[in-house]
Amino acid sequence: MSATGTITVASIYAPEIYPTAMRSTGYGVASAVGRIGGMVMPACSGRTCHRVSPNGSRDFV
């Protein structure tokens, strides 16, 4: 709920504070980083977040 409110307030006040070119660059970079993270993390989490314990079961770290 608070995340939605924060984004709404930022979307309302950002045009008053930042020029259009800077605002669109910021939104573009944030979107690109989010998409790259969405592609990379499933591969990384399968390798780094699980370990095999001595009894052979998989534990989430």
Image (cartoon, rainbow, N blue to C red):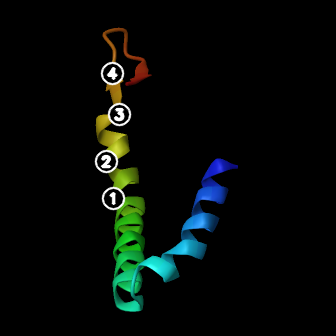
Position above or below: 44 against 50: below
* Lower position in the chain sequence, tag 1 or tag 4: 1
Secondary structure beneath label 1: helix
**Disc number at residue 44?**
2
Do callouts 3 and 2 mark residues in contact (Cβ within 8 Å)? yes
- The earlier-in-sequence mark between 4 and 2 is 2
**Front one among 53 and 40:** 40
Q: Secondary structure at mark 3?
A: loop
Q: Residue at x 42, y 73 (%)?
A: 31
In the drawing, does residue 11 fall left or right of residue 17?
Answer: right
What type is the residue that disc 3 sits on? Cys
User: In this figure, which residue is indicated by the disc labeled 3?
Assistant: 49
Q: Nearer the viewer, residue 3 or 54?
A: 3
> Which residue is tagged 1?
40
Which label belongs to residue 61? none
How far is mark 1 from mark 2, CA to CA?
6 Å
Sooner in the amino-acid sequence: mark 3 or mark 1: 1
Bin the neighbour count of mark 3 within 10 Å (Cα to Cα): few under 14, some 14-19, many 20 and up: few
In the rendered view, tell whether residue 51 sits above or below residue 3. Answer: above
Residue that mark 4 sits on? 52
Q: Position of residue 37 (x, y in %)?
A: 36, 60
Amino acid identity at mark 2:
Cys
Q: Nearer the viewer, mark 4 or mark 2?
A: 2
Q: Where is 51 relative to 2, above or below?
A: above
Residue 48, compared with residue 44, is above or below; it is above
Badges 1 and 2: C-beta atoms under 8 Å apart? yes
Is residue 32 left or right of 12 when viewed as pictured? Answer: left
Contact flag, marks 4 and 2 (Cβ < 8 Å):
no
Is residue 7 rendered to the left or right of residue 51? right
Closest to the camera, between mark 4 and mark 3, is 3
